[in-house]
Image: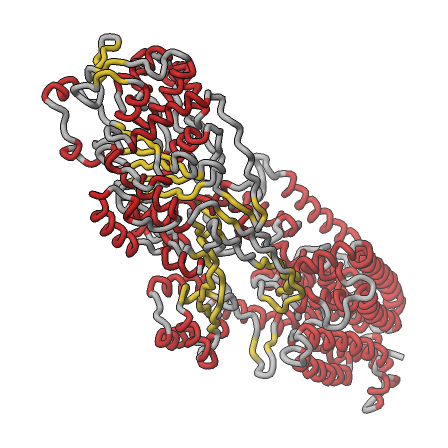
Amino acid sequence: MRKSPTEVTETHGRMSRRALLLGGTMLTFMTGLGFRMRHLQLDQADQYRLLAEENRINIRLIPPARGEIFDRNGIVLARNEPSYRITLVPEDAGDVDAVIDKLATLVELDPTELDRAVTEMRRSPPFLPVTIADRVSWDELSRVAVNTPSLPGVTPEVGLSRYYPLRGDMAHVIGYVGPVSDYDLSKIDNPDQLLRIPRFQIGKVGLEGRMENDLRGAAGTKRVEVNAVGRIMRELDRREGEQGDDIQLTIDQGLQSYAQARLGNESAAAVVMDCQTGDLLAVASAPTFDPNLFVQGISVADYGELTGNDHRPLAAKSVQGTYPPGSTFKMITALAALEAGVVGYDDTVYCPGHMEISNRRFHCWKRGGHGNMNLVQAIRESCDVYFYDLALQVGIDKMSEVAAKFGLGEKFDLPLSGVARGLNPSRDWKSSVRGEDWVIGDTANASIGQGFVLASPLQLAVMTARLATGKAVPPRLVKSINGVDQPVPEPPRLDISPTHLAEVQRGMYAVSNHRRGTAYSKRIIEDEFRMAGKTGTSQVRNITAAERARGVTRNEDLPWNRRDHGLFVNYAPFENPKIAVAVVVEHGSGSKAATPIGRDITLQALYGGTPPLSAYPTKDRKRIETQQEELEKLVPGREITRRNRA
Amino acid sequence: MSYLEYNVKHVPAGLRKVLHVNWALLLLITAVAGVGFLMLYSVAGGSFSPWAEPQMKRYALGVVAMFVVAMVPIWFWRSVSGFAYLVSLILLVLVEVMGSVGMGAQRWIDLGFMRLQPSELMKITLVMCLAAYYDWLPPHKTSKPQWVLLPVLLVLIPTALVLRQPDLGTSILLLTGGAIVMFLAGVHWGYFAAVISMVVGLVVAVFQSRGTDWQLLKNYQYRRIDTFLDPSSDPLGAGYHITQSKIALGSGGWTGRGFMQGTQSRLNFLPEKHTDFIFTTLAEEFGYIGAISLLSLYALIVMFCIASALANKDRYSSLLTLGIAGAFFLFFAVNMSMVMGLAPVVGVPLPLVSYGGSAMLVLMVGFGLVQSAHVHRPR
């Protein structure tokens, strides 16, 4: 098509105008881009520089070493052991299967662990190390270390893991640590970043759990440069963490191990306390379990075995278990009556073997009755009718008041799990909790430590220590934290007449030293270590009138869990009380199960080791000798004890 | 017969043509490409492989291609414009068909030494074709509806094909590039105003109808538009790239963090650091000064082309040069807006700098056409 020259010039002019317009628009836009760049790069540079650093720098935590736990003599109860594991970086390994095959010739690989590792490998980026074998031995580790050149991507690693050298002996006091669970995290408001470290160990129960904050320590940090997918490019700097505090307990490991061994497989608990300071020397609970099982996470089979056992190995019975104190409560009833002035030392009560209270017959343990009994005699022979009589005169209010002074119904502040409050019943308690009025029969039951009264072995030990010293001794478990001794406050005197107390103490002395005392056969012969005590038997079932008529079933004929609990509390030496002991044997068919244990533990504590046979009554010596030999073999901690003390 | 052919005798011939090449423009292009080599070397962690070296070879090839194209008279290119467009269109259809009949998402044709993307080729041939059309069309017909419809179709057909691939970035470039040529050719304002107001109206309608009974799109489509327009609403997904890009840009400051010192690119926080986001690396390592310098180089290239076009009395040459300059502008403007968070991430590389064979070669051919127009301009 033809165009006239004018048309050409005209269109060219229009195009030029439009081209200039377009050029102008472009320039404006580019200026806009320049300003945007200026805004980002100059005005907001600091902010973006910071963001870039945040991107680049990753702060990694260095887990601190957990504080160790010692007994009062410096024997290690919980320590950190190097834990060797073998990790594999799939990316460096190349042919992962070939490397694992080669590794299997050097180390025994657990198939389940391996399966887990392979799954983990598929999920995580290839440059992250995956644990192939955990808890390998030093030998295996060195074998792998020597062969690393032919095992690409394999690294032998050393970490720290908790170890309890005494195994079951301290399990109920120290508890155990375990890998942090989601449940643990959910309980804490603002969890320490440390807890997010995979496989980080946290105190779960016992002292490990309750003193977690002292034991854990503070994390160190290292700043590393990472790339977009999280691979560490280099370490920029590092700040070491702070080790957790070491904790020294008041526990005497030798005594504790002995007590555990002496309790054996009974379902039982024993507490040994220093009468003067309140130091807990042994807090034993049987049967026990190996806390090391929990450290890496316990297997379902092992856990099932522990929870399925009717002797409840996981329960710390010495502080968590509560039992009707039975006759061991009678000192409280006696003191209440003496303090209230309703009875004199030599006032006697006639025991025909039973007593009618509001149309109900309350029996004495001795069917034929004790005859005339005064205070010392009644304690010595544990006459129930005497204490029914006292209780009816003094009333529950005074009894409850005195019981409280001796620590019954009090929850002691110890760093242990589930420290039991027990139950020191009162009128108010019954009306508010049970919605019923207190009746006279309740008072009678309480007077002999039955009915509503419940106490833990710990509370019984505290009660005994207070009976021995007349001072409000509180129990104490932690001797020092990080080398700093915890204060031992001078306990205040109990608001109880010392002469009244002395009379009750005379009764307790007679229990084990008078020919007619209930614990006479299990006495201590050595004069300077004579003990004062009280036996107890607490029923766990009601004996019906019908049963009583045809004759009460012998305990031995009952199923285990229907048998009576056996209790024994004592302190020694009588003249200058050093230790108080409480022993409870669940379903032990009465006090005879607990008394010898209490005596043996007392002697062990007073002698600071195996006592000479001369301390025992002559006819017991033969049996004691064999028992001592057997226990020597049983106590695993004794090896450690000797080595450390030498 | 066009205005040009009356003056053929004044046009340089033979090797003398080389002297008449727009050397300043070539120098600017080389400078920009040089920045590209430097950045590709840097993002590879201080290595010529895998990006800088192939890119340099391609550039060398591109320069040769540019000279070859530049030596061929512009009237030859004008005469083959329609044919070139048709070839590009056929190739575009071909990859579309191949792509849909089981060859996967292949959008290129393997030439042995490089993979040619027909959509890249179309960016230049569309401009050529439109320029030739308006050169042929008597100016008084330019704004007649029936004569407007044809170029509109010429633009819309490849745009639709590329959009189907789906390559939103390139289709936007084609559409806008075509519109720029039509605008320059003198199509009446009214058409543009009408189209723009229709688009605006449609967008407003789409958004206004949201949540009402007569809403035009499905809810998930609205959500997709939301993330597209505002990536920061999805900081770990679509927003991740743009956030990291802004961090890299911003952390550059005045002078940057130093050559090969950009942590964002070196540690792989930047996505596509050797292609679409290479400008970010430049801005991170050389700061505001580096970024403004590159922007200035681009501006100079565009301005040189416009100047060359304005000085050229041949309508085809002017339109072609301006069209190519416009397309080039669109390239870097969209890319920069994208990495600065001003525009959605649509996948447009930075011309001459981003790693990529087709784009580089096609651009160099485009500049070859500009040079040819310059060398063979009527005097």
Q: Is residue A245 above or below residue B209?
A: below
* Quadrant into which the C terminus of chain A falls: bottom left
Task: Say how many tags the image has.
Answer: 0
Q: Residue furthest top?
A: A358
Which of these two is toward me, A295 or B59? A295
Q: Residue furthest front?
A: A527
Residue furthest toward the bottom?
Answer: B15
Q: Residue at x 39, y 61 (%)?
A: A116
Q: Is residue A414 visible?
A: no
Q: Return the x and y of residue A448 as percentages of the image width and height.
A: 30, 22
Q: Quick check: B6 left or right of A580?
A: right
Q: Nearer the viewer, residue A559 or B1?
A: A559
Residue A475: percent from left, percent from top: 47, 36
From this view, report whether residue B185 is shown above or below residue A378: below
A203 lies above or below B106: above
Q: Is A395 located above or below residue A94 in the figure? A: above
Where does the image place residue A512, in percent across and percent down from the top left?
Answer: 29, 33
